[in-house]
């Protein structure tokens, strides 16, 4: 579904930006991102979170952040400038830098839910959040496997929500994600692989690639070696690839997992479907840890974040690199702008 904002009420998107884990590097990264924005930025921003968390991040980053405060009503949201929707989600005394805590988890969940509610109501056109911490989210009461599934449940999304990652034009998604490795094999089937391919294809198309070229990774070493190391490639993955070709996809596979990312690195494919989390994440982070981003696909509004974590080991040092958050912000602006343009032309 499209948000009401996508119906053409704005020509320039408004993006909600969250500080992420208050005990991590997120507030510092947010401050650095805000300091980096200028008159050429193609979106308005609405920072969502606690004033003291934002101020602490600015002090660590060594920058000044001063934004007019807004309330979450339609009249206030009509203002087209950078602003701060002030929330009270965590007491200053409960901020404990470098630690995963329930208080921090509850703070992250409250800001996430507030942001996606604003997006669903059409008051913002996309969401970009600084790094979260899954341990803290679970300590704070999240019962889903990850923040993407939590957002989907919060919004009542019934379809397939899937995490995608990108580094400098190469996109990946995976058939299974935050599950134990011992459970992966039982979760791989043709329909799940096809769903991942379709989501990846549509996402790459949304960012402007007319005919995405895809590759599908095998599950087993050497793509199963003709069944000697497992039959998933023969019985499941290859048939899914053939079905995708019949649907018109430009796709190859199953490709040995120890070499499939060379296809992306060399520019021979635009996207890769992996079978499980680390099969893609290790490769992508090696390709560009400080440039990789995450898109939460399948949600009614674009939601992005950097692929990096909360980096407790460097909290407060002022050395966290903002590049991945900037790439995530730029992507959500692109996606939101394209949605608005499509709605205005409909």
Image (spheres, rainbow, N blue to C red):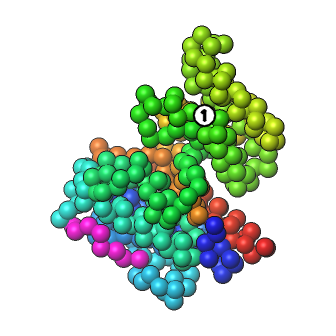
| Residue 338 vertical position relative to residue 12 in the rendered view, above or below | above
In this picture, residue 111 sits left or right of residue 216: left
Q: Residue 2, image x and y in percent?
A: 64, 69
| Residue 10 vertical position relative to residue 188 in the rendered view, above or below | below
Quarter of the image for residue 79 reads bottom right
Which image quarter holds the N terminus? bottom right
Q: Is residue 153 magenta?
A: no
* First to last magenta residue range: 85-92
Taking the spot 61% from the left edge, 19% from the top edge, the residue there is 231
Residue 37 visible here: no
Quarter of the image for residue 39 reads bottom right
Q: Residue 120, image x and y in percent?
A: 54, 72
- Disc 1 target residue: 189
In this picture, residue 248 sits left or right of residue 62: right
User: SS class of the residue under badge 1?
Assistant: loop
Q: Main secondary structure of the magenta part?
A: loop
Q: What count of labels does the image hold? A: 1
| Residue 147 vertical position relative to residue 174 in the rendered view, above or below | below
Nearest to the observer: residue 283 or residue 108: 108
Mark 1: few, some, or many residues within 10 Å (few <14, many ≥20)? some
């Amino acid at each position: 579904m499209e948000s009401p904002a996508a119906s053409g009420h704005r020509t320039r998107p408004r993006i909600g930006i969250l500080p992420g884990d208050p005990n991590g590097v997120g507030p510092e990264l947010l401050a650095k991102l805000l300091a980096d924005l200028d008159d050429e930025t193609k979106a308005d921003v609405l920072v969502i979170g606690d004033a003291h968390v934002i101020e602490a991040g600015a002090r660590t980053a060594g920058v000044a952040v001063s934004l007019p405060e807004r309330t979450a009503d339609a009249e206030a949201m009509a203002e087209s400038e950078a602003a701060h929707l002030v929330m009270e989600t965590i007491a200053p005394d409960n901020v404990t830098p470098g630690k995963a805590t329930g208080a921090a988890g509850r703070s992250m969940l409250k800001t996430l839910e507030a942001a996606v509610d604003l997006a669903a109501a059409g008051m913002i056109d996309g969401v970009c959040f600084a790094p979260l911490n899954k341990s803290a989210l679970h300590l704070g009461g999240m019962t889903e496997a990850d923040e993407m599934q939590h957002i989907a449940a919060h919004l009542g999304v019934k379809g397939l929500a899937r995490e995608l990652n990108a580094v400098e034009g190469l996109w990946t998604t995976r058939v299974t994600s935050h599950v134990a490795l011992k459970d992966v094999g039982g979760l791989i089937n043709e329909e799940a692989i096809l769903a991942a391919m379709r989501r990846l294809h549509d996402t790459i198309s949304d960012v402007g690639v007319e005919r995405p070229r895809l590759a599908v990774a095998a599950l087993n070493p050497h793509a199963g070696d003709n069944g000697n190391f497992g039959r998933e490639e023969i019985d499941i993955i290859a048939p899914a690839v053939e079905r995708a070709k019949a649907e018109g996809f430009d796709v190859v596979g199953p490709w040995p997992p120890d070499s499939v990312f060379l296809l992306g690195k060399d520019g021979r494919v635009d996207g890769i479907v992996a079978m499980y989390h680390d099969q893609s994440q290790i490769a992508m982070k090696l390709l560009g840890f400080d440039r990789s981003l995450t898109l939460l696909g399948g949600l009614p509004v674009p939601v992005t974040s950097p692929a990096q974590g909360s980096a407790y080991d460097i909290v407060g040092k002022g050395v966290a690199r903002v590049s991945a958050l900037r790439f995530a912000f730029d992507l959500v602006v692109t996606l939101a702008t394209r949605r608005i343009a499509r709605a205005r032309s409909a």
